[in-house]
Structure formats: structure tokens, C-alpha cells
Image: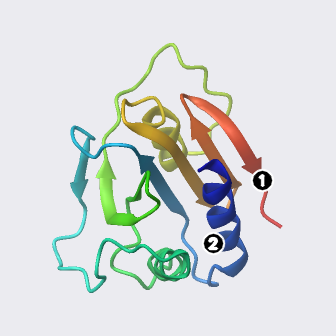
Amino acid sequence: MIKKIINLCNDINKLKSKNFEGIGLVIYSDINELPIASMNTEKTTYDLPISSYDDILKTLIEISSSNSKFQDGFHLLSKEFKLTHISQYFSTPIIKNLIVTNIFGSRYRTALYGSCIPNVLFTAVISKNYGLIIFENGKEIYKKELN
């Protein structure tokens, strides 16, 4: 699973548009009780869930652009590697004993804390400022700076 996430994130990073705003991903084992709510009241034109790797990649690149109504929030992938939800507010608790070693911002901190939530397998962020980071259980397990 982690290899698929790394490949997807690296492909997003390679193929992102010039209007790339960043992206946050949550990879989960069970959606029940995840602290999420839709950030967009407009009905999506995307037919979710999306199963094909190429279609997931294309969709995530499209919605990570400043031109997309669905750019904000986190996008959710199931353990079966299906894109099931886009543009979700991901409300994570603050974990006081977790050591935070940088000041990258809200999306980074949400992904860090969110990786500790039950049923969350991994979280990932790609920023136009600091690159790609994947988290598992409150730890950075993969990091790649942008070129």
C-alpha cells in the first residue's frame, strides 16, 4: 500500500499544473467515525468512488489547482485504493505529546495529527513550498523536497 501512495504522490508532484495549490490525502481502513465533513456544498461532477489509478491521478491533479472548486480540504482514499471523497474538512485533535519539528502550516499539522487517528492508515501532503511528506502514526515516513 505505501508504495502505491508514494507513487501516486510522486506522480501528482511531477504532473501538477502551474496553478497547483497543494494537496492533502487521507488513506483509511474504515470511514466510520473519521472526523470529516464536506467543504463544498456544490454537487461534485466526479463519479465517486474512482478505482482506476490513472483516473484517480487525473482527478487529484485537476482538483489541486487554484481553478478548482474542490481544491480545499483533504481527499480520501480507501484501503482498496479508491478515491471515495474529495474536499473534506478533516478535523483532527491536537496531540500534545507529539513532537513537531517544523512550522510548515495547517495542512501539514492536520496530516501529522490525523495520521494518529484510528482507522487512518496514512496521511500525505504535497506543498508548493516544502514538498511531499507521508505520515504514519504521527511520524514522517517519507519525505521528498520539490525540484
Q: Nearer the viewer, residue 111 or 56?
A: 56
Give the percent coordinates (x, y) of residue 96.
Answer: 46, 16
What residue is shown with label 2? 12
Label 2 CA crowd tier, 10 Å (few <14, some 14–19, many 20+): many
Q: Quadrant of residue 53?
A: bottom right
Q: Residue furthest right?
A: 147
Q: Identify which residue is drawn at 38% across, 43% down.
A: 29
Tell me if residue 128 can be seen: no
Most foreground residue, 27 or 93: 27
Query: Which residue is outermost to the front?
Result: 80
Mark 1 or mark 2, earlier in chain: 2
Under circle 1, the secondary element is strand
Location of residue 86 in the rendering, given as x and y in whole percent from the top left corner = 34, 66
Q: Is residue 89 left or right of residue 12?
A: left
Say which element carries label 2: helix
Q: Where, quadrant-wise, is the C terminus in this rendering?
A: bottom right
Q: Name the residue located 51 percent from the left edge and 13 percent from the top edge.
A: 97
**Quarter of the rendering containing residue 120:** top left
Q: CA distance from mark 1 to mark 2?
A: 13 Å
Residue drawn at (16%, 71%), measured in percent from left and top?
41
Task: Write the residue at 46% across / 80% down.
Answer: 59
**Amino acid at circle 2:** Ile
Residue 11 disc label: none
- On the picture, is 10 further left or further right than 117? right
Residue type for callout 1 = Lys
Q: Is residue 3 above or below residue 34?
A: below
In this view, 24 is above or below 128 = above
Q: Which residue is mark 1?
A: 144
- Can the viewer see residue 112 in this picture? yes
Residue 37: x, y in percent?
21, 53
Would residue 119 appear left or right of 14 to someone viewing this image?
left
Q: Position of residue 55 (x, y in %)?
A: 48, 82
